[in-house]
Image: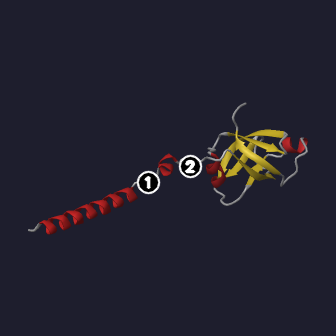
């Protein structure tokens, strides 16, 4: 082999190495993807519906809504109306999907002047 053939072969080898490195780099995810964590919602705006059949201090929450907020069956939840009136209920998960309604026992709410179908904020009770 002549010297020219050797240099052209070496150049071709270096080109293939560069291509291989680029392919490897394209497989590695960016740092932002490695550090990303899925956020768990802390609170959600919902509508309150009265349900006389529930026991006192109980609330029914749709399965999808409970999953978004990290609420399990039997957990304490807090419902806040107009940022001032706070109520604590025990959660019961129901199989209803795709709704933003929470069904509650109405006695305490009616005393405080909260109407059926009111907009409120739902969150997991923190105990403070």
Q: In whole angstroms, how far apart are the C-alphas of marks 2 and 1? A: 17 Å
Asked whether the residues under the numbered discs 2 and 1 touch, taking CB atoms below 8 Å apart as contact, a structural biologist would say no
Q: Secondary structure at mark 2?
A: loop
The residue that mark 2 highlights is: 38
Name the residue nearer the viewer: 1 or 96.
1
Q: Secondary structure at mark 1?
A: loop
In the picture provided, is 94 more to the left or to the right than 89? Answer: left
Q: Residue at x 83, y 45 (%)?
A: 81
Coloring scheme of the render? secondary structure
Q: Residue at x 79, y 46 (%)?
A: 105
Q: Nearer the viewer, mark 2 or mark 1?
A: 1
Q: Residue at x 85, y 45 (%)?
A: 82
Q: How many marks?
A: 2
Name the residue nearer the viewer: 96 or 56.
96
The residue that mark 1 highlights is: 29
Name the residue nearer the viewer: 11 or 35.
11
Q: Residue at x 64, y 44 (%)?
A: 71
């Amino acid at each position: 082999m002549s010297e020219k053939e050797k240099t052209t072969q070496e150049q071709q080898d270096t080109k293939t190495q560069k291509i291989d490195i680029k392919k490897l780099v394209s497989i590695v995810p960016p740092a932002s993807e490695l550090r990303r964590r899925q956020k768990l919602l802390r609170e959600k705006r919902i509508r309150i519906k009265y349900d006389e059949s529930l026991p006192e201090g109980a609330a029914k929450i749709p399965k999808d809504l409970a999953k978004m907020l990290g609420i399990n069956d039997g957990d304490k939840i807090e419902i806040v109306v107009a940022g001032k009136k706070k109520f604590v209920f025990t959660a019961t998960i129901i199989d209803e999907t795709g709704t933003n309604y929470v069904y509650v026992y109405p006695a305490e709410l009616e005393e405080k002047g909260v109407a059926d179908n009111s907009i409120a904020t739902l969150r997991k009770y923190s105990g403070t």
